[in-house]
Image: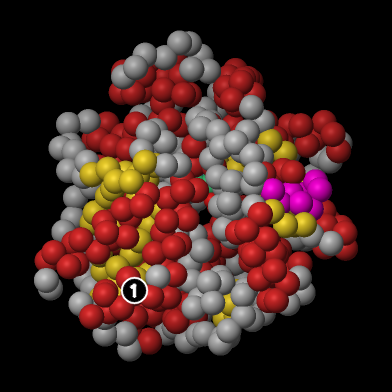
Amino acid sequence: MRYLSTRGGEPASAAEAIVRGISPSGGLYVPESYPTIDWNNDVRGGYLATAHRVMQAYLPQTDSTELMNMISAAYKSFDHADVTPLVKLREGEHVLELWHGPTMAFKDVALQMLPHLMRSSLRQTGETKQVYILVATSGDTGKAALEGFRDVEGTRVLVFYPYGGVSEAQRLQMVTQEGNNVDVCAVHGNFDDAQTGVKQIFASRAIASELKEKGWRLSSANSINFGRLLPQIVYYFTSYQSLIASGEIKPGEKVNFCVPTGNFGDILAGEYARRMGLPVNKLICASNRNNVLTDFFESGVYDDNRPFYQSMSCSIDILISSNLERLLFELANRDDSLVREWMQGLKEKGMYALPQSALDELKQTFSAGWCTEEDTLETIKHIFDETGYLMDPHTAVAQCVYERYVKKTGDRTQTILLSTANPYKFASDVLGAFETADKDDFANADRLKAITGAPIPKGMSELLGKPERHLDVCDLADMPKRVLAPILGSNK
Ligand SMILES: *Cc1c(COP(=O)(O)O)cnc(C)c1O
């Protein structure tokens, strides 16, 4: 299995794709074909066995036993035996809880696995340099990457997050991070600015050669890395299998997935599962006020010339959705010159438009919607009142969009809602659905527990009292300097 770049250039092996993160042409790596999997027979035997079946199909060069060992090690840190349990919410609606990992958000599913994939890939490619992983985060990727790569030999991690643009729990999780190879810096700008800054650093020959001289190469733990996408395909299969096992669907029956979407990695994994043969009816893309994707799925025009809003579902406050490029590559029938043209349009004018035929194809699988902050709070409240289930703001965005989808279409297909964070990660905002919140996040968490009875996760209470170790802030223009400083300074 080889990997093609969405913007053309030489194909790469899986290991090369994972080590590089992004292709030399600036494109994203996609598999040259989608392996098919028998969703009924191949994926029995629980999460780990399914993960092995799915990932091995994309990593044929990785030794089977080694892969199983990596998977077992990665998901050991999850606090639920099913890894990503499926909970029935109401008739026809099921919540897939993706946040049972160490940082309480769905990024752990991929970022507990990526360091193992990275190490194995480094070995396979014979890479001798150390790997410097740069991350731009809207809140959750940063902590998950720090935790995943902490003290992993031969690696170093630097996370940039938008100053003032993440929740207090998210900030604390990052600035209190322990480990000898980890580094965190806030930037004056929003997530898109930080992500663009990181992409520019990747594209800089000067930075690459300075690092190379010191024995380092850059790589990415952002969801543009194929090694991030791959572990996420797994839970689409396990949740489907779980609906069969509980008798909610007949084998082969199609289901919907509704996904709170930012950088388009999570929902794209669903599209990959569909291409691998999973019976999917609709993938529903849910956004907050930053509704660039809703407009795109309706009109075929991607236009990021619009205000950026900070919201309580801050991990999906994104206007440039990087992983969409992988879907565009398919819509272009894998014509990389067309993808280059659209991406050029995005860079120069902040927009591009699909031809009608591509839009029609898109609409066969995807549906999209968005909701406001008030809608989000109202959804948290009415779902709790009706079912006793407490949702975080991201999950609530998906729930609200799903309810409107049902009203509009009458589609009663069994639906799996992807729940991407534990509600306590956003305790103050979630409490706001019930009463006026205090300033203190931890007091709010206690209040939320008193009202709802939902247990406070251990990781949350442990944050209190940990020393804040990483309090650096820099301007966007200084990001390259900040990347080089520890390497040039340490003279290693
Ligand atoms: C990252 C994140 C998302 C969005 O996932 P994408 O793969 O970027 O679309 C949604 N919810 C939470 C809580 C997240 O951390």
| Residue matched to label 1 | 206
Q: Residue at x 20, y 77 (%)?
A: 214
Which quarter shows the N terminus? bottom right
The reply to whether residue 197 is visible in this rendering is: yes
Which x, y percent locates residue 404?
76, 32
Which quarter shows the C terminus? bottom left
Label 1: element kind: helix
Q: Residue at x 74, y 49 (%)?
A: 296
Amino acid tagged 1? Ala
Left/right placement of residue 441 relative to residue 403 reads left
Residue that protrudes farthest toward the top in the picture: 436
Left/right placement of residue 56 relative to residue 454 reads right
* Vertical arrangement, residue 379 with respect to residue 264, above or below: above
Q: Which residues are magenta?
A: 296-303
Which x, y percent locates residue 32?
64, 81
Q: Quadrant of residue 260?
A: top right
Q: Residue at x 45, y 42 (%)?
A: 190
* Residue 204 lies in the magenta stretch: no
* Vertical arrangement, residue 390 with respect to residue 5, above or below: above
Q: Residue at x 34, y 80 (%)?
A: 122
Which x, y percent locates residue 418?
59, 45
Q: Quadrant of residue 53?
A: bottom right
